[in-house]
Image: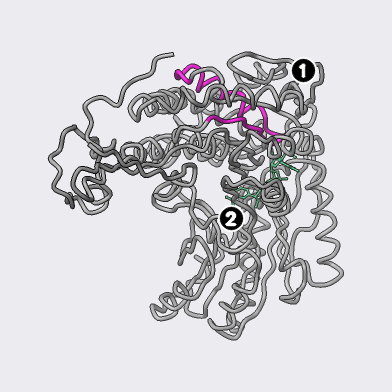
């Protein structure tokens, strides 16, 4: 393994980075890297749209689907210390849109493989920490380039494995590339978070730096199988930690492909290890392993809080960086453009069948416009195309697993009993769709604000609409939730907008966004994270304060 020195580099001070003016008088002795690479979001579909070239997008995607389909059904090992590892046990993954389509057979890990993977990660950690900024960044930039070259294949894999339609699947891959680019740029901008703090008193030279914790567990959910697996692991790795990663059991193929990409990009053996398998068989022992110093987790609130509690009970001091669920509210004022609000809520609630932590799930509408809003939303919801992810016109894609299908049947039954279902509530089995798990987008009213249907996260294409007398009541009800992930407002009144921004308890806040009332954040511009039980740290993925969480501070004083 090649270990590169820090080279002729002067460390920037915090002041250089944040204000551009050095605050100390020590003469610079090294060059420093305060000119990070330029960051631009990877916006594949939008770029083709703006170039009037949407057909090229569709053609490339359809060709990729064809070739990925032909490659499906193989067997996929774990990756420990750079070696492919079979375990004797396997699990089979099928496509949510067509359960007759086998995605592949995956080696199923257990405590034994967790032990081996943590041990490999621990052994690789000291060398990996010595890689300087440029050499670490180079690896992640190589990976981003490989992903750019393979983006259609990766998007097709996401569609087939987790059921996202083509534009959403590409957005997932784009976001993963964005994480690699943005974290590279941030790590460079801060010169690896190493500052020369000068000579506080004569003869003493001080530096201040952030150092990795050691081994991180990275546990990801099914719904952004590429972006979140890549983003969390890149955060841990680029900051010098080594990783044992466990993807969701329903989406291991995308993770497996990314591990291969990083290997090709030059990541040394043992730095990223992949153990596939179930939450309790792999996830739990991984979190509880004595040599795991930190956890990056995205998933449900129950599992995330359980991980945090286990970590504390075991006396571990490292971070649990957990991004959790949401119950995302939207307020529609009587000054709103109702058509825009309907468009925004429809996109926020029903894209990827509501299987997004940011999905719009409850809408508080001023009484004077609630009937108009509800009627229009129902009409729009009924016009949405339900179908396989890979079909060009599909908007409402399949549900991930049988548990989600059962939950849908249960909550829609409850909605019929306790409220009014205006549209939806049925499983769709027309034609070929009976091979997948397809359901109708569902719009419900007359559910009390306190009802569990209006309080619990469901992760399904299901939205409740509630009347409110005005902004104060809308804000009060929006905030009366244990979650605080995303929120939306539709209003043309500037006073209402300013007041809402000040009062809403939510990590991400959107006003008048017809593209989606609550979903669709971009790395850097719209860092992603939640308040309250929607996250454990208050620092957001894809934002300026994310990477520091994977490190701990050390101040170094040398008397010269
Ligand atoms: P889960 O919490 O069910 O699973 C997430 C991951 O945790 C999976 O890899 C799962 O493994 C694993 N896991 C399950 N049990 C344990 C355990 N006891 N110990 C350790 N790991 C475990 O979430 P979903 O995959 O269903 O994803 C949906 C959830 O994720 C929603 O609540 C959503 O809001 C949230 N989410 C939050 C985001 C955010 O940024 N705030 C973004 C995206 C999703 P396995 O698959 O094998 O069960």
Which is nearer the eye, 134 or 231?
Answer: 134
Which mark, residue 536? 2
250 lies left or right of 519 = right
Which mark, residue 385? none
Residue at 79 percent across and 33 percent down: it is 281
Label 2 vs label 1: CA separation? 34 Å
State the quadrant of the C terminus: top left
Q: How crowded is mark 1: few (under 14 residues within 10 Å), some or many (20 or more)?
A: some
Q: Is residue 116 visible?
A: yes
Magenta span includes 460:
no
User: What is the secondary structure assignment of the residue under circle 1?
Assistant: loop
Magenta span includes 250:
yes
Q: Is mark 2 within 8 Å of ligand 1?
A: no
Residue at 85 percent across and 57 percent down: it is 410
337 vs 291: above or below: below
State the quadrant of the N terminus: top left
Q: Quadrant of residue 224?
A: top right
Which is nearer the eye, 162 or 198?
Answer: 198
Stretch of the chain drawn in magenta: 242-267
415 lies left or right of 41 = right
Residue 318, image x, y percentages: 57, 45
- Which residue is disc 1 drawn over? 87
Residue 220, image x, y percentages: 63, 39
526 lies left or right of 94 = left
Q: How is the rendered protein coloured? A: one colour
Which is nearer the eye, 245 or 384?
Answer: 245
Residue at 61 percent across and 21 percent down: it is 120
């Amino acid at each position: 393994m090649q270990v590169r020195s820090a080279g002729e580099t002067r460390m920037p001070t915090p002041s250089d980075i944040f204000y551009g003016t050095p605050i100390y008088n020590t003469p610079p002795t090294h060059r420093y890297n305060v000119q990070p690479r330029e960051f631009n979001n990877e916006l594949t579909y939008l770029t083709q749209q703006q170039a009037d070239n949407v057909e090229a997008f569709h053609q490339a995607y359809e060709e990729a689907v064809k070739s990925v389909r032909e490659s499906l059904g193989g067997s996929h090992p774990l990756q420990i210390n750079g070696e492919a590892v079979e375990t004797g046990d396997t699990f089979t993954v099928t496509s949510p849109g067509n359960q007759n389509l086998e995605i592949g057979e995956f080696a199923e890990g257990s405590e034994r493989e967790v032990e081996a993977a943590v041990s490999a990660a621990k052994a690789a950690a000291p060398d990996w920490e010595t890689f300087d900024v440029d050499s670490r960044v180079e690896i992640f930039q190589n990976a981003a380039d490989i992903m750019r070259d393979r983006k259609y294949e990766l998007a097709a894999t996401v569609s087939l494995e987790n059921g996202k339609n083509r534009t959403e699947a590409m957005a997932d891959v784009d976001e993963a590339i964005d994480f690699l680019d943005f974290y590279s740029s941030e790590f460079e901008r801060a010169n690896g978070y190493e500052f020369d703090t000068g000579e506080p008193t004569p003869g003493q030279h001080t530096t201040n730096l952030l150092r990795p914790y050691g081994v991180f567990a990275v546990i990801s959910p099914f719904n952004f199988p590429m972006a979140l697996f890549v983003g969390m692991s890149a955060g841990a790795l680029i900051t010098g930690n080594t990783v044992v990663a466990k993807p969701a059991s329903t989406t291991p193929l995308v993770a497996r492909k990314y591990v291969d990409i990083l290997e090709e990009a030059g990541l040394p053996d043992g730095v990223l290890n992949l153990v596939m398998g179930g939450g309790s068989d792999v996830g739990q022992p991984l979190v509880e392993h004595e040599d795991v110093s930190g956890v990056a987790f995205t998933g449900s609130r129950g599992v995330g809080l359980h991980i945090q509690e286990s970590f504390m009970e075991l006396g571990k001091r490292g971070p649990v960086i957990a991004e959790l669920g949401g119950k995302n509210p939207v307020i529609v004022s009587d000054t709103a453009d109702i058509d825009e609000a309907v468009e925004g809520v429809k996109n926020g609630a029903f894209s990827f069948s509501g299987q997004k932590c940011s999905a719009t799930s409850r809408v508080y509408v001023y009484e004077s416009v609630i009937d108009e809003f509800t009627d229009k939303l129902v009409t729009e919801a009924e016009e949405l195309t339900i179908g396989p992810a890979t079909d060009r016109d599909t908007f409402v894609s399949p549900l991930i697993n049988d548990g989600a299908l059962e939950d849908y049947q249960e909550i829609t039954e409850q909605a019929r009993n306790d409220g009014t279902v205006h549209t939806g509530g049925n499983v769709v089995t027309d034609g070929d769709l009976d091979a997948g798990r397809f359901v109708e987008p569902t719009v419900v009213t007359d559910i009390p604000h306190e009802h569990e249907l209006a309080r619990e996260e469901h992760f399904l294409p299901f939205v409740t609409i509630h009347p409110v007398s005005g902004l104060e009541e809308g804000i009060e009800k929006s905030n009366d939730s244990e979650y605080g992930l995303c929120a939306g407002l539709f209003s043309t009144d500037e006073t209402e907008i300013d007041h809402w921004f000040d009062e809403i308890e939510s990590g991400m806040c959107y006003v008048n966004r017809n593209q989606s009332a609550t979903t669709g954040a971009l790395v850097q511009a719209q860092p992603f994270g939640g308040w309250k039980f929607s996250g454990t740290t208050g620092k957001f993925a894809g934002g300026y304060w994310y990477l520091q969480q994977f490190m701990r501070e050390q101040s170094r004083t040398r008397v010269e």
